[in-house]
Image (spheres, rainbow, N blue to C red):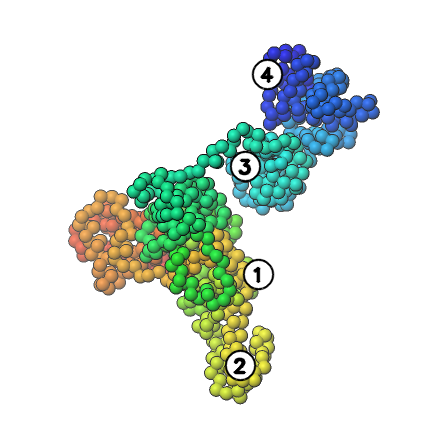
C-alpha cells in the first residue's frame, strides 16, 4: 500500500487503483481517512463492494459500520483485508498487482483496476450487487435496425455522433431518436442526482434510469447540484423592466413602465429576459403573448410549435428574400389561435381573418429557420425528373439545404452538372400539378390511383410540396377550394361543388338528379343508375321531390371526398413535413392565395425592381433595359416577362418566400444576354443601339426557352 501523507491530500493515491487522480465524474469522490492514512475513490470502493459481498460473505465480513464510520460505512480493517487480498491478483490490462475488481461472468477470471477497466471499456454497475463486466461480457443495448442515414446530435452536448450503440454511445430506451455520449450522460447524472436524472426528450425517469444503471452510469443518491447552491435563483427574483424592441416609441425612454396603460412593459413569455412596451409591439392587452426574437428563432430551429403572430400588413409578391427578420419578429405580438370548431363559422374565416393576418413570405421565411447550413446533394435525371426526385427525397433530410446536380444517364458517361434549386422545384411543381395524383383542369382535387397508393406517392407528393414551399419553391396554385378547405377544416366540414367532379358521367348523374322535374322523373334516374348508387352507398328511398337534393349531395360528397379519403390522409401526412400543414391550418388566409391561385402577371415595374445591380450600370444599356420591359408590357414583343424570369432564374413567377440569392443584373460587352440560374444572374449585352439590344434579347431568350421546352417535352414523352 502506498505511503500517503495526510497533509498533501491531492497527491494521495487510492489504495485500490493506486492513482492520485481526483476526477469525480470518472472515479467518484476521493476521500481520505487521515487517522489511518487511507485514501479511496468512491467508485473503486463501490465496485469492490460487489466482490466484498460475493467473495467474502462466507468469512463473515460485511459492511458493518454506519454510513459515517470508516469510509462510506466500510470499516478500515475490512478495507485493509481486501487490499491485502487484491495485492495477490494481477490486472489483466496493466499486468500489475492490486486488481481488486473482477468480471462476474461465470468462468471469467479477468481482474483489473477500476481505471484499467474504464480504459478497456468495462462496465461497472452502481446498483444491486454492484456487478462489473469485462470487455468481453459487458451488457449491450438491444436496439431496432439502424434506419438513420446520417449522424445525429447528442441531445446533451449537440455534437454529432454516429447513431450506433457502442460503449461510448448510448441510446435512450424510451425515445428511440435520442442518442448520448456516455461521458455526457455521466456528467449529467452526477449533476442531476437520482431525483432529476431523466431522459432529455420525454422526461421519463424510471425506464431511463434503469437502462442507464445497467449500462454503467453512476446516479448518485443526492439532490441536484443546482438545488444545493446557495442563492442559486436569486437573479430570478429580479424582473426585467426594459423595452428591447428595435424602435421604442415611448418618449419617456425604454425603462419607463406605467401599469395598466399602453406603456406597461410585457416580458417575453419564453425567457422573461427581454421586454416590450405594449404599444411598441402593437399589443392590445397585457394578456396577449409575446416572444423576443431570440426565443422565436430557437423555437423554429428546434422544430417546436410556435404560437402565431398578430396583424401584419399583407404585401404583394415579394421582390426578393431580403425581409427584415428583426422587424417582423420583434415588433409583432403572438396571440394563440383557438382551434376552429366544426360548423359554418369556417366559411367566414377568409373574410374575417384580418385579426390574425400575416404575410405569406414572413411565414415561409420563419419555417425556413429550420433549414441547416449542411447541404445534401440530390442527383436528378432530367429525363425522369419525377421518379428521380421521389427516389432522392425518400432518404433526404428536409432540414438540410438542397443542392441539385443534374445527371444524364443516357449519354453513357453519367456526367453531372450543377443545377438551380429553384428551377428544379419549379419543374417538380409543374409535374405534380399535371400528374395522375390530381384530377381537374385548373382547380384540382386528389384522384384515386391504386398504383400511386401502393407506392405511397400521395404521401411523397405532400412531402415534396411542403419541402418546396419551405426551401423557396414556387406557388403551387392548382388546389381547388374544396381540397384546401378539407386540409384546413377537415373533410367533414367541407361542402364540395359540382365543378369539383371531373368525371363527366358522374357529373351528368348529379345534374339529372338535381334537375328532375317530378318524383317519377327522379325514380327513373335512380333506376337507371341503380347499380352505381348501390355500389357507392348512396342508394336511398325517395318519397318527395325534395329528396333529390340530399341524393345529389350524397353522390357529390362520395365522388369528391369519401372516394379519395385514403389518398387524402396520406397526402395530409406528407404535408406535415417541416410543420407546413400546421401553418396552413393556422393561417389559411395567407396560404389560400398561393395554393389555390396562380401568381399575378408580372409587370415591368415588378421585374425591374426585382433585379439588383451587381456592377456599375451602363447608363445607355440601363435605359435600353427599362424600355425593353416597357415594350413587353405594352405587347410590342413576342417575349414575355415570364420568359425573362425563366431565362435568368428558372422560375416563371416570384416564389412566395422570394429569391435566394436575390436576382441581379450585370453589364458586359457580349453579343447575347446570359442567364445564370444557379446565381439568379442576368448578364445584359452592351450594344450601340436599342434595336441591337432588343434583337439580341428576343433571339436569345425566346430560342433558349423554346429549346428547354422541347427538351422537357421530349423527356416527358419518353
Which comes sooner in the sequence, label 4 or label 1? 4
Instruction: Give whichever of 695, 644 is nearer the camera.
Output: 644
Residue 15 shows which numbered tag?
none
**Residue occupied by mark 1:** 454
Quadrant housing the C terminus: bottom left
Q: Earlier in the sequence, mark 2 or mark 3?
A: 3
Tell me where residue 604 appears, x and y as whole percent: 25, 57
- Can residue 650 be seen from the camera position used here? no
Question: Circle 3 is placed at which residue position?
Answer: 156
Instruction: Name the mark nearer the viewer: 2 or 3.
Output: 2
Q: Which mark is residue 10?
A: 4
Image coordinates for residue 570, horizontal then vertical, percent: 54, 59
Residue at 49% across, 66% down: 343
- Does residue 97 appear in this view? yes
Is 484 left or right of 229, judged from the image as shown?
left
In front of the other: 297 or 222:
222
Amino acid at each position: 500500500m502506498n505511503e500517503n501523507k495526510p497533509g498533501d491530500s491531492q497527491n494521495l493515491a487510492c489504495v485500490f487503483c493506486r492513482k492520485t487522480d481526483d476526477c469525480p465524474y470518472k472515479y467518484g469522490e476521493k476521500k481520505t481517512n487521515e487517522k489511518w492514512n487511507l485514501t479511496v475513490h468512491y467508485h473503486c470502493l463501490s465496485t469492490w463492494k460487489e466482490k466484498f459481498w460475493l467473495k467474502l460473505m462466507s468469512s463473515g465480513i460485511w459492511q458493518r459500520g454506519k454510513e459515517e464510520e470508516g469510509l462510506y460505512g466500510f470499516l478500515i480493517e475490512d478495507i485493509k483485508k481486501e487490499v491485502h487480498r487484491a495485492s495477490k491478483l494481477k490486472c489483466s490490462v496493466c499486468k500489475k498487482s492490486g486488481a481488486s475488481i473482477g468480471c462476474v461472468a461465470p468462468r471469467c477470471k479477468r481482474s483489473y483496476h477500476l481505471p484499467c477497466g474504464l480504459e478497456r471499456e468495462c462496465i461497472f454497475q452502481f446498483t444491486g450487487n454492484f456487478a462489473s463486466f469485462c470487455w468481453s461480457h459487458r451488457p449491450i443495448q438491444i436496439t431496432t435496425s439502424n434506419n438513420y442515414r446520417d449522424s445525429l446530435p447528442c441531445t446533451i452536448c449537440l455534437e454529432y455522433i454516429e447513431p450506433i450503440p457502442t460503449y461510448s454511445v448510448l441510446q435512450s430506451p424510451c425515445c428511440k431518436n435520442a442518442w448520448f455520449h456516455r461521458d455526457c450522460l455521466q456528467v449529467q447524472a452526477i449533476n442531476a442526482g437520482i431525483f432529476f436524472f431523466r431522459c432529455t426528450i420525454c422526461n421519463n425517469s424510471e425506464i431511463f434510469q434503469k437502462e442507464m444503471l445497467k449500462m454503467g452510469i453512476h446516479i448518485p443518491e443526492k439532490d441536484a447540484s443546482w438545488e444545493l447552491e446557495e442563492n442559486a435563483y436569486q437573479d430570478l427574483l429580479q424582473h426585467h423592466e426594459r423595452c428591447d424592441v428595435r424602435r421604442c416609441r415611448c418618449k419617456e425612454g425604454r425603462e419607463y413602465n406605467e401599469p395598466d396603460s399602453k406603456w406597461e412593459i410585457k416580458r417575453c413569455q419564453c425567457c422573461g429576459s427581454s421586454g416590450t412596451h405594449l404599444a411598441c409591439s402593437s399589443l392590445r392587452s397585457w394578456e396577449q403573448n409575446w416572444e423576443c426574437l431570440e426565443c422565436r428563432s430557437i423555437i423554429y430551429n428546434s422544430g417546436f410549435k410556435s404560437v402565431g403572430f398578430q396583424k401584419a400588413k399583407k404585401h404583394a409578391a415579394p421582390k426578393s428574400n431580403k425581409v427584415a427578420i428583426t422587424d417582423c419578429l420583434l415588433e409583432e405580438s403572438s396571440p394563440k389561435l383557438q382551434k376552429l370548431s366544426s360548423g359554418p363559422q369556417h366559411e367566414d374565416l377568409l373574410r374575417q381573418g384580418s385579426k390574425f393576418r400575416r404575410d405569406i413570405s414572413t411565414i415561409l421565411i420563419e419555417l425556413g429557420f429550420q433549414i441547416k447550413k449542411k447541404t445534401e446533394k440530390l442527383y436528378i435525371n432530367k429525363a425522369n425528373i419525377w421518379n428521380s426526385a421521389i427516389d432522392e427525397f425518400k432518404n433526404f433530410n428536409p432540414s438540410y439545404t438542397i443542392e441539385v446536380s443534374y445527371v444524364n444517364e443516357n449519354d453513357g458517361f453519367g456526367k453531372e452538372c450543377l443545377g438551380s434549386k429553384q428551377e428544379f422545384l419549379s419543374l417538380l411543381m409543374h409535374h405534380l400539378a399535371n400528374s395522375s395524383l390530381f384530377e381537374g383542369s385548373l382547380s384540382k382535387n386528389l384522384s384515386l390511383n391504386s398504383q400511386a397508393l401502393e407506392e405511397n406517392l400521395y404521401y411523397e407528393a405532400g412531402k415534396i410540396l411542403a419541402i418546396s414551399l419551405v426551401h423557396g419553391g414556387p406557388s403551387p396554385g392548382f388546389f381547388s377550394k374544396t381540397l384546401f378547405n378539407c386540409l384546413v377544416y377537415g373533410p367533414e366540414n367541407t361542402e364540395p361543388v359540382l365543378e369539383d367532379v371531373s368525371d363527366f358521367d358522374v357529373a351528368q348523374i348529379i345534374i339529372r338528379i338535381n334537375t328532375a322535374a317530378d318524383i317519377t322523373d327522379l325514380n327513373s334516374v335512380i333506376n337507371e343508375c341503380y347499380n352505381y348508387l348501390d355500389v357507392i352507398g348512396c342508394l336511398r328511398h325517395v318519397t318527395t321531390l325534395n329528396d333529390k337534393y340530399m341524393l345529389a349531395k350524397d353522390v357529390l360528397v362520395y365522388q369528391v371526398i369519401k372516394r379519395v379519403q385514403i389518398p387524402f390522409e396520406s397526402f395530409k401526412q406528407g404535408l406535415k413535413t417541416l410543420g407546413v400543414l400546421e401553418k396552413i391550418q393556422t393561417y389559411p388566409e395567407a396560404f389560400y392565395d398561393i395554393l389555390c391561385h396562380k401568381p399575378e402577371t408580372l409587370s415591368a415595374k415588378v421585374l425591374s425592381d426585382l433585379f439588383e445591380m451587381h456592377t456599375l450600370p451602363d447608363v445607355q444599356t440601363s435605359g435600353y433595359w427599362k424600355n425593353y420591359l416597357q415594350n413587353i408590357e405594352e405587347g410590342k414583343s413576342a417575349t414575355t416577362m415570364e420568359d425573362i424570369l425563366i431565362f435568368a432564374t428558372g422560375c416563371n413567377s416570384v416564389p412566395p418566400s422570394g429569391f435566394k440569392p436575390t436576382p441581379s443584373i450585370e453589364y458586359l460587352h457580349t453579343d447575347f444576354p446570359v442567364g445564370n440560374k444557379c446565381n439568379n444572374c442576368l448578364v445584359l449585352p452592351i450594344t450601340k443601339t436599342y434595336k441591337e439590344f432588343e434583337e439580341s434579347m428576343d433571339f436569345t431568350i425566346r430560342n433558349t426557352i423554346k429549346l428547354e421546352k422541347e427538351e422537357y417535352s421530349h423527356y416527358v414523352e419518353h
